[in-house]
Image (cartoon, helix red, strand yellow):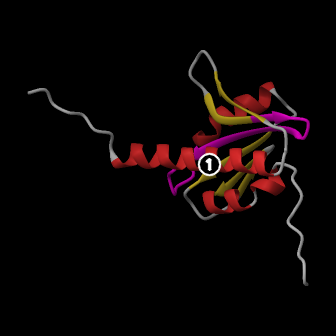
Amino acid sequence: MPEILLDSDDEVDGAAIETLVFECLRAENANHDLGYQIFYWRTMTGAEVDFVLYGERGLHAFEVKRSSVFRESDLDGLRLFCADCPAAKGHLFYGGSKRYRFDAIDVVPIAEGLSTLREVLGGKRPSKRGR
């Protein structure tokens, strides 16, 4: 009988987190009529960025990493993209708890990144009625 190969828990978790971020990007874009188109970016040499949002409000590149430990090499794809597109704002969401900033790239914990997507993408903040 052939051996069945299953994805590891880390691979499944990574794909699930990327899907969560993708769905949140789509929801913010649609719900607030932000007008972005969503793309994926990859070079012929294999460098990539998970999500690129382009529209009248700007150009944003998002990379998603499950790991709770940030490594500067996690920025490689974003750095290449931002070098090719200087107007781009880079965002790396990761499983850690600290914020970092490297030139045009913000590195933020996933939960924080998701909670500030509307503001990052140029949408209006929700009104604070009754305050």
Amino acid type of the residue that numbered disc 1 sits on in the rendered structure: Val
Residue 109 picture location, percent across and down: 63, 59
| Position of the C terminus by quadrant | bottom right
Q: Residue at x 91, y 36 (%)?
A: 56
User: Badge 1 local density, few (<14 within 10 Å), some, or many (20+)?
Assistant: many
Question: Residue 64 colored magenta?
Answer: yes
Q: Residue at x 71, y 29 (%)?
A: 80
99 versus 32 height, above or below: below
Read off the magenta span.
53-71
Residue 72 picture location, percent across and down: 61, 44
The residue at which mark 1 appears reads as 21
- Exactly how many numbered labels are in the figure? 1
Assign a secondary structure to mark 1: helix
Q: Is residue 15 left or right of residue 39?
A: left
Q: Residue at x 39, y 48 (%)?
A: 10
Please indicate, yes or no, whether residue 71 appears anywhere in the rendered image.
no
